[in-house]
Image (cartoon, grey):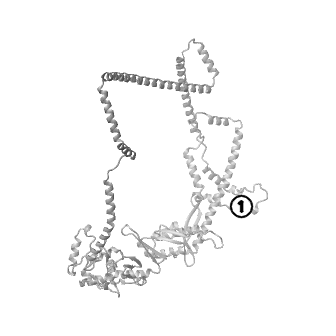
Amino acid sequence: MDIRDEKWRNAAEGYLGNHKLSLVVAPAYAKAAMEVYEELDQSEAFHVAVLDTERAGESTHEVLTNSLVEEVIVRESYLQPYLDLLLGKVIKCESLEELRSCRIGITPECMLYHTFRLQHINPDHYTRFAYIGKDSVRRRIRLLEKNLEAMEAEKKPQELIIGECSRILSLEALTEGTEVYAEWQQEMASFKEKEKEIRKLEQKLEKLKAQNVEEWEKEREAILGLCEGKRAELRALDRLMGDLQRKAEEFQREAVQLEEELVAKERALEADQELEGVLKTSLEGNETPRYDRLKDRYFALLKRAEEAREEAYRLLVSARGEYVRKYPNRNFSLTAEDNQEYDRLLEIMECANLEEYKNMAAEQAKSAVLHFKDDFMFKIRSAIRDALQRRDELNRIINRLDFGKDKYQFVIGKNKGPDGRYYDMFMDDSLEINPSQLTDSLDNQMNLFTMEHENQYGELINDLINIFIPPENATPEQMEEAKRNMDKYADYRTYLTFDMQQLIQNEDEVIKIRLSKMIKKNSGGEGQNPLYVALLASFAQAYRINVPQKIQRNPTIRLVVLDEAFSKMDGEKVASCIELIRGLGFQAIISATNDKIQNYVENVDKTFVFANPNKKSISIQEFERESFPQLMRELDEEDEDAGGVAGE
């Protein structure tokens, strides 16, 4: 290939990219070449492509006016249809306005506009990897030479720095401190003076050697030997004196410590006159008492006393364990050294007013039961009425909305099981209080349990209370069962049943079908209908969407996020769901898989397509609902053109 106008050389090189490196043979050999390519090692040949020149030459493609293919010359005519396919729709442009006016456009500066995206082409495609034309090799060589010259220019100052560093590193290293070298310099300066002094001393020594000094040397050696012996004796005496002094100091410290302990024990000692008398009597019987023997005898007595004490403590712990097992509600320690808790309990139980306390306890228990009945009864009643109110509120929300052709309604009623027998007791009208009927007197005006209610449900109330109260001396299992019963019957939902029903309008009547009956008969998509009705109605209640405009309220979020929603519904029911979301005033974000996208694109405002083909980077494409038909037409055209080439 070659380029007619140098102005468009970079644009053609950059847009063609790797397509200009395809292997080409004559059409007659295209099939054989592809068969050979199929047998190659995949790990070595994946970056090479073989062009099917036989089929490419058989097809014709539309070439737009002023397209980039006009600037490309091919030597072999059978390559022209393939270039028409690649470059026939790429319009040559000079400005951004021209780029935006065409579907695919490119400028001489290699600015590419493709599939509504504006992008710079990778410069390597028209510089380092430029292969079109006979001069392409020379141009790459010139480019490399320029790069080489630039590198050489950058290299020179670095070489100067390296040379200077090498010169400095070749110098002798000084490992000593500066004061050492300063001292050496001073010694070098005074070297001559010391040489003169040495010569004088040597002359004086020669004169002394000339005299009779042998006797003096012998006497000197004897004296030095005697001195060394005396020094050895002195060092031995010093060591002995040091050891004795250390032992004396240790004995002194030990004596001081013992005296302090003796004083402390004498201060803390409380004399026992009885024991003092026994000791005095024992000592009077012995004229010369042996304290070591007395000590051993009393230690033996002490050991026997400690053994007796441990045996008594063991029996006490055993008795305590027996008592706690018999009375598990007594949370007393088994191993306490003192017996204060048990003594206090004994003192209380030995009280002469025990019968009076029993009567007071009975009165308190009766009062506690009455208060419990009041509080428990009206809490459950209030919770049930609140649930019924929320049911009516949710039904008002979904009553004005159609879910396709169906309507739904929440149903809350009396539990049909054994626990439902308590429902009427909580919801009886005799518990309703009319403030206008209360008298001015405070007597009994807060007695909310009327005689009528007590007479009618008294036995049922007692049955329910007995469920909460464990039997006397209850086992841990019975206590745990009472706790579970309390958790169960303190929940208002125990006395109710919850359901939804579908409303089907016939000619003259409305048929109601309970969800609990139809859920197992319907298909998966139909079974999801009431699920989303309940979900969206609950969101509307939580967001307070149904509160009238005249009532002042704080702003609330209206976002609903659904992951793979409506997965089992067809397109018609998905459209109904989205219309229901819009009718309630929500803003919805819905995620879906590729096979379900056709159910959403025509009903939502925006569609974002996320793709991660190579598991390395995620691409995001946004579509407006208005532009979707045009996009589908363009995709159909690209399919007819055997696929397009994406820009860099």
Residue in the image at 32% along x and 31% along y: 204
- Residues 445 and 537: in front is 537
Residue named by callout 1: 433
Residue in the image at 62% along x and 57% along y: 422
* Residue 210 in the image, given as x and y percentages of width and height: 29, 26
In which image quadrant can residue 475 be found?
top right
Task: Answer yes or no: is residue 559 visible.
Answer: yes
- Residues 399 and 145: in front is 145
The correct choice, above or below, for 588 with respect to 377 in the image is: below
Q: Residue furthest right?
A: 440
- Residues 529 and 215: in front is 215
Please give left or right for residue 603 compared with residue 483 in the image: left
Q: Amino acid at mark 1?
A: Ile
* Residue 520 in the image, given as x and y percentages of width and height: 47, 66
In which image quadrant can residue 614 be found?
bottom left
State which quarter of the image contains the N terminus: bottom left
Please give left or right for residue 623 compared with residue 362 in the image: left
Residue in the image at 57% along x and 27% along y: 260
In which image quadrant can residue 571 be found?
bottom left
Tell me if mark 1 has few (under 14), some (14-19) or many (20+) residues whose alpha carbon lies within 10 angstroms of its own: few
Q: Secondary structure at mark 1?
A: loop
State which quarter of the image contains the C terminus: bottom left
Task: Answer yes or no: is residue 523 visible.
Answer: no
Please give left or right for residue 263 compared with residue 214 in the image: right
